[in-house]
Image (cartoon, helix red, strand yellow):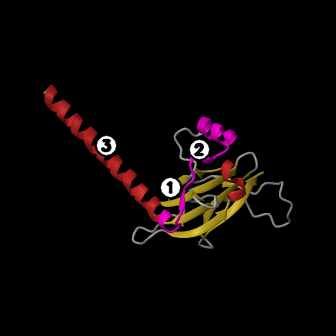
Amino acid sequence: MRRLCDCVLLWVYVLVWCVALSAGQGENSDVRRILNRFPRYHVLTLEERNDDARTFIRAHFPKHNPSIVHADFDGDGHPDYAVLLKDKKSGTTKFVISLCPGDTECKTVHEVDVTPSAGAVYIRPVRIGSRVSQTDAIETNDYPSPVRLSSPGIELTYFEQAKMIYYWNKKHKKIEGIQTAD
C-alpha cells in the first residue's frame, strides 16, 4: 500500500510540474510575440535600473518581475500584458500594454516613452476592487472621479518621482491612466 501511495504522489508531482512548465512556456511565447512587434527591443532587466531602484525592488518585490505584468486587464477572460521594453541600440525605453484576445495576436493598445526614467521605472499589478484617484498635487479643475477597478490595473512607478495607474475603462473601451502620486 505504501508503494502505491508513493507512486500516486510521484505522478501528481510530475503532473503539477508539467502543467506549471507549460503555463510558463505559454507566457514566454506571448512575450516573444510582443517583442516581435518591437524589433531591437528586449524586456528591461533589473540590472538596467539604477542602484536605489534595484535595491528597493529586490527588497520589496523579490518574486515579482518589475518589467512584466500578466493579467486580464480588459475583463474578456484572456490574460493580457504590460511590459517595459528597451531598445538595444538607442536606449529608448517604452511602457507597453498589449491586449491578447484568445483567438488572435496580442494588440498594443497603449504605449508611453519612459526613456528619461528608464533606470528608475518599474511596474506591478493593481488588484481588482482597488480605488484609485488622482493626486492632489496636480493643479487642475478637471479632476477625474475616483475609480474602483473592475479588472486588474497596472501601476507604473517612477521610483521616488511619481506613480500612474493604468486601467481598462469599460465605458470607453480603452486603457486610461490616473496619476496617483508624485
Q: Residue at x 67, y 53 (%)?
A: 118
Q: Which residue is mark 2?
A: 47
List x then y, in percent, for residue 152: 56, 56
Above-or-below relation of 101 to 22 = below
List x then y, in percent, for residue 148: 64, 57
Q: Which residue is mark 3?
A: 17
Report how far apart the C-alphas of labels 3 and 1 lie in the structure: 20 Å
Q: Which residue is mark 1?
A: 70
Labels 1 and 2: the sequence-earlier one: 2
Q: Secondary structure at mark 2?
A: helix
Mark 1 surroundings within 10 Å by alpha-carbon count, few (fewer than 14), some (14 through 19), many (20 or more):
some
Question: Does residue 46 appear to the left or right of 76 in the view shown?
Answer: right
> Which of the pair 170/140 is nearer the observer?
140
Above-or-below relation of 61 to 153 = above
List x then y, in percent, for residue 34: 49, 64
Can see residue 92? yes
Report how far apart the C-alphas of labels 3 and 2 lie in the structure: 29 Å
- The type of residue carrying mark 3 is Trp
**Outermost residue, top direction?**
2
Labels 3 and 2: the sequence-earlier one: 3
Pick the quarter of the image with the N terminus.
Answer: top left
Residues in magenta?
A: 35-60
- The type of residue carrying mark 1 is His
